[in-house]
Image (cartoon, rainbow, N blue to C red):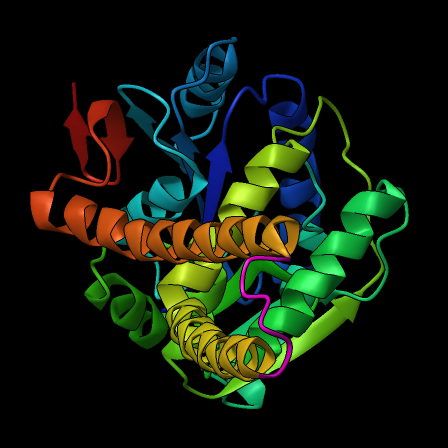
Amino acid sequence: MKKTLTLVVPAYNEQEALPIFYDEAMRVYETSLKDKVELEFLFIDDGSKDDTMAVIHKLNESDHRVHYVSFSRNFGKEAAIYAGLENAAGEYVAILDADLQDPPALLPEMLRIVEEEHYDCVGSRRVTRKGEPPIRSFFARQFYKLMGKISQTEIVDGARDFQLMNKKVVNAILSMGEYNRFSKGIFGWIGFKKKWLEYENIERAAGETKWSFWKLFIYALDGIIAFSTAPLIVSSVMGVVMCLVAFLAIIFIIVRTLIFGDPTSGWPSMVCIIVLIAGIQLLSIGILGQYMAKTYLETKNRPKYLIEEAKLKDKEVL
């Protein structure tokens, strides 16, 4: 009996891209995967405001292999990924974006690696960022370099959420039940035997990206806080350094007063020093506040997502 491959597809305002994605995924399945696995789709509608759900309903009516989960509002891609993994029924699960920047054409090779080379997971990474704004590409590369230095979790430069994994890996990801999720870090933290496939950047098939520069910046901060305590260490080190500087400054002032008898000069520099120290204090408090805020959200124990409607294999939720 053939195993089942579930394609988990998070979608937010992707009414234009979904039909193109479905056709391309089916083309790949019919030409390269049909003899190896059964296929099912699991679309996760992340509170879309366009006709994304109408498109999904239409696909569901025409193909019994199409299933879906629709959120009550926009909970974010991380929640959509978790929901997809939690409700995927296949022995193999692949996560793909609906915009075809994660090419379904890689699925046959991913499946071959898992089955024949006995890897638990196959990830994908872009080796180029052609088509992206240069400033965005620059900061993305700097983020990966920074994470490589301050985190013990491996986060590969150019890594995508596009993964094909077996059930063992899926269960490991689901066992990490934190509310504040950073999937790229989670994929690296769980370990297991993993292989990377490289490919050149592919532009969206339709629609517009939902990731603004600001959203990517916040996402990067979430990743740093989730998988590194280095900012807290840096804050502590700055405090120690400023204490040493202050101690040396006191000695300097005492010596200068004894020699020159002028302890009151230099007030402009004193103001600058006060402002500098105050800035460092506020920065340190802000860093600590970010970690406390994440802890606060975790202790609320809120659900990661709420379902408005869903049609899954052998069950329906309304």
Q: Is residue 125 visible?
A: yes
Figure label count: 0
Up-down: is 232 above or below 89?
below
- Can you give x and y, in whole percent of width and height, for residue 154 in the image? 53, 80
Up-down: is 134 above or below 245?
above
Which residue is drawn at the image coordinates 67% and 51% (left, top)?
104
- Whether 72 is among the magenta residues is no
Main secondary structure found in the magenta portion: loop
The quarter in which the C terminus is drawn is: top left
- Residue at the farthest front position: 261
- Can you give x and y, in whole percent of width and height, for residue 312 in the image? 26, 36
- Can you give x and y, in whole percent of width and height, for residue 195 in the image? 60, 82
Which residue is drawn at the image coordinates 71% and 51% (left, top)?
103
Observer-nearest of 209 and 33: 209
On screen, residue 209 versus residue 311, left or right, reads: right
In the image, the segment drawn in magenta is 259-265
- Can you give x and y, in whole percent of width and height, for residue 142 in the image? 72, 63
Residue 266 occupies quadrant: bottom right
Q: Is residue 2 visible?
A: no
Observer-nearest of 291 and 233: 233
Which residue is drawn at the image coordinates 44% and 80% (left, top)?
247
Which residue is drawn at the image coordinates 30% and 50% (left, top)?
289
Residue 35 occupies quadrant: bottom right
On screen, residue 167 versus residue 136, left or right, reads: left
